């Protein structure tokens, strides 16, 4: 086969790959519909943690708060809360909200999971 | 048979192009697909959405901020968040979870449907009326801090302590030394419901439907009241308010023919024995099981 034909084949192959990548990444990428909360955007994660903090202000149930925070990932509840508190401080959350997060952080730092028999 | 011509444009251009296209799609869809790192709650899996709703309702039970709860529910991208809340509460009860766990969801659904935050279900301590008459400084400080929030959220119900903190601003005279409660008394949660109405409902579309409507002493529908229906083969427990589209005080139950039911309203211990499904006749002369509408009210 002449080298000119090889060049044509190579160019066509490359063009095909580029088109395939464009279609798969840009035009019709895979859509996720059943995601887990660990990939929520940071503001949504923080709002979720704030909700947990607000409910903790009401029931003071550390066990329930830790269980609710656990769906955000494998990090410890204290680490998750600390990240949320940091975000809240950076983004001018109200004083009450920051206080609620601070209270939750204190609770999670001292929280000891109940041992199952 | 014709031999494949290796010099055709098909082999030189189209076949490599299609091969490359396939390779590109395999890589972009399977080997290295687009990964989401900043997702929104609307994409959550159904069980995580349930958990999200529970946390929204729990936060609402604490803050009573209905506008914020509604905004948070909107993040889940559902067309009818009230129905979703009610359905989830029903699922929780059906799964054997306690009413206390389902109550925040039902309460939020009820409040969303009626458009305002109802009184919290838990008892709150009454404010002290004989607050110190001097030292108004803390009151002024607190008021100045709270006013901006109340302007931002006019729909929120201010905590009761605010109004009492403001009272020292009014000059206190000797005649007012014996303070009287100014709040309107409300019936206690344990006041008994009495059966005040029993109507036969002949609707062929809803045969044997026993409908309950529970009203408090102000004729407002009462949500979250437990009803127990027993019969010779079993028992069913349910609560008012889980179908807010039909009313906060509404609940229903399907009766069978030739079965005697006993009804107990748990709050206050009202008891209605020997209830049976009535018989109705359609326009063609055929009989079918009718329904009942039972109305209970607190005195």
Image (spheres, coloured by chain):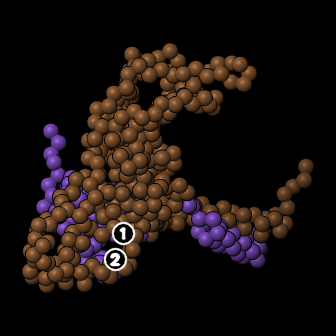
Chain colours: A purple, B brown
- Quadrant of the image occupied by residue A88: bottom left
Circle 2 residue: B150
Q: Are marks 2 and 1 in contact (CB under 8 Å)?
A: yes
Q: Of A87 and B169, which appears nearest the observer?
A: B169
Compared with A78, B110 (above or below) is above
Instruction: Decide which of A106, B176 is in the foreground and name it.
Output: B176
Quadrant in the picture for residue A71 = bottom left
Q: Tell me: residue B90, above or below residue B16.
A: above
> Image point 19% across, 80% down: which residue?
B170
Instruction: Tell me the distance, in whole angstroms, between the alpha carbons under discs 2 and 1.
Output: 7 Å
Residue pictured at 36% horizontal, 69% vertical: B156
- Return the chain for callout 1: B
Of residue B89 and residue B270, the one placed in the foreground of this image is B270
Q: Residue at x 15, y 39 (%)?
A: A117
On screen, B159 above or below B101? below
Q: Which residue is mark 1?
A: B156
The quadrant of the picture occupied by the C terminus of chain B is top left
């Amino acid at each position: 086969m002449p080298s000119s034909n090889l060049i044509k084949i190579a160019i066509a192959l490359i063009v095909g790959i580029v088109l395939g990548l464009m279609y798969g990444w840009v035009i019709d990428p895979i859509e996720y519909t059943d995601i887990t909360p660990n990939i929520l955007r940071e503001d949504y994660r923080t709002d979720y943690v704030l909700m947990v903090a607000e409910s903790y202000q009401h029931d003071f149930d550390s066990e329930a708060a830790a269980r609710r925070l656990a769906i955000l990932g494998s990090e410890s509840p204290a680490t998750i809360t600390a990240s949320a508190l940091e975000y809240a401080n950076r983004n001018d959350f109200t004083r009450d909200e920051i206080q609620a997060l601070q209270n939750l952080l204190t609770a999670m730092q001292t929280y000891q999971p109940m041992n199952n028999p | 048979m014709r031999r494949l011509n290796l010099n055709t444009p098909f082999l030189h251009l189209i076949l490599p192009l299609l091969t490359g296209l396939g390779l590109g799609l395999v890589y972009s869809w399977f080997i290295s697909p687009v990964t989401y790192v900043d997702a929104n709650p609307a994409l959550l899996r159904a069980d995580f959405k349930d958990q999200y709703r529970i946390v929204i309702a729990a936060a609402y039970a604490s803050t009573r901020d209905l506008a914020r709860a509604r905004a948070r529910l909107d993040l889940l991208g559902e067309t009818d968040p009230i129905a979703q809340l009610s359905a989830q509460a029903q699922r929780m009860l059906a799964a054997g979870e306690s009413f206390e766990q389902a109550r925040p969801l039902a309460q939020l659904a009820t409040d969303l449907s009626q458009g305002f935050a109802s009184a919290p279900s838990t008892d709150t301590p009454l404010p002290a009326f004989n607050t110190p008459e001097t030292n108004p400084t803390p009151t002024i400080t607190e008021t100045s801090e709270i006013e901006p929030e109340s302007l931002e959220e006019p729909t929120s119900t201010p905590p009761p302590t605010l109004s009492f903190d403001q009272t020292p601003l009014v000059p206190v005279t000797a005649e007012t030394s014996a303070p009287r409660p100014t709040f309107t008394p409300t019936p206690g949660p344990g006041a008994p419901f009495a059966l005040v109405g029993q109507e036969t409902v002949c609707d062929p579309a809803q045969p044997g439907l026993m409908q309950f409507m529970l009203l408090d002493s102000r004729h407002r529908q009462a949500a979250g009241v437990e009803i127990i229906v027993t019969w010779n083969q079993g028992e069913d427990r349910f609560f008012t308010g889980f179908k807010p589209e039909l009313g906060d005080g509404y609940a229903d139950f399907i009766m069978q023919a030739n079965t005697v039911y006993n009804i107990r309203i748990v709050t206050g211990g009202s008891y209605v024995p020997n209830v049976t499904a009535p018989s109705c006749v359609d326009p063609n002369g055929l009989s079918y099981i009718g329904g009942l509408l039972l109305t209970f009210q607190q005195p």
